[in-house]
Image (cartoon, rainbow, N blue to C red):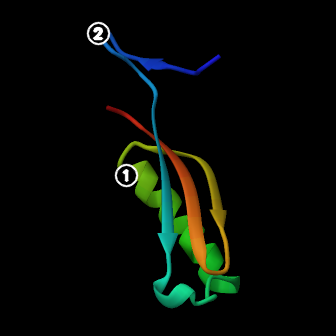
Amino acid sequence: MRDYQSLAHTTWDCKYHVVFILKRRKKVIFGVIRKHLGKVFRELAEQKECQIMEGHLMPDHVHMCISIPP
């Protein structure tokens, strides 16, 4: 069963799979940078009234599944 969100006249389930890949696939996402990026992504999602459903910070790329309002 899907978790649809709704308002008075709309029902939606908008999700995006976003992947950030570093230039030349340099493996630099670790330690302090990794913690800082997680915080930045959460703050940006909160500002835009979005929700990060799932996220993975890999050494050379970032995967996120983001739920957004219409």
- The residue pinned by badge 2 equals 9
**Residue 60 — which label?**
none
Residue type highlighted by circle 2 = His
Q: Nearer the viewer, residue 19 or 57?
A: 19
Alpha carbon of mark 1 to alpha carbon of mark 2: how far?
24 Å
Residue 27 in the image: state x and y as whole percent. 63, 88
Vertical side of 25 occupied by 14: above or below: above
**Residue 47 — which label?**
1
Within 10 Å of disc 2 (Cα), the crowding (few <14, some 14-19, many 20+) is: few
- Name the residue: 60% across, 83% down: 33
Residue 63 in the image: state x and y as whole percent. 58, 61
Circle 2 — which element? loop
**Which numbered disc, 1 or 2, marks the residue that appears first in the sequence?**
2
Vertical side of 60 occupied by 41: above or below: above
Vertical side of 24 occupied by 11: above or below: above
Residue type highlighted by circle 1 = Gln
- Name the residue: 57% across, 76% down: 36
- Asked if the residue at tag 2 contacts the one at tag 1, i.e. Cβ–Cβ closer than 8 Å, the answer is no
Residue 2 in the image: state x and y as whole percent. 59, 20
Residue that protrudes farthest toward the top in the picture:
8
Q: Is residue 15 left or right of residue 69?
A: right
Image quadrant where residue 44 sits = bottom left
Residue 53 in the image: state x and y as whole percent. 59, 44
The quadrant of the rendering that contains the N terminus is top right
- Name the residue: 58% across, 90% down: 26
Vertical side of 67 occupied by 6: above or below: above
- Name the residue: 62% across, 82% down: 29
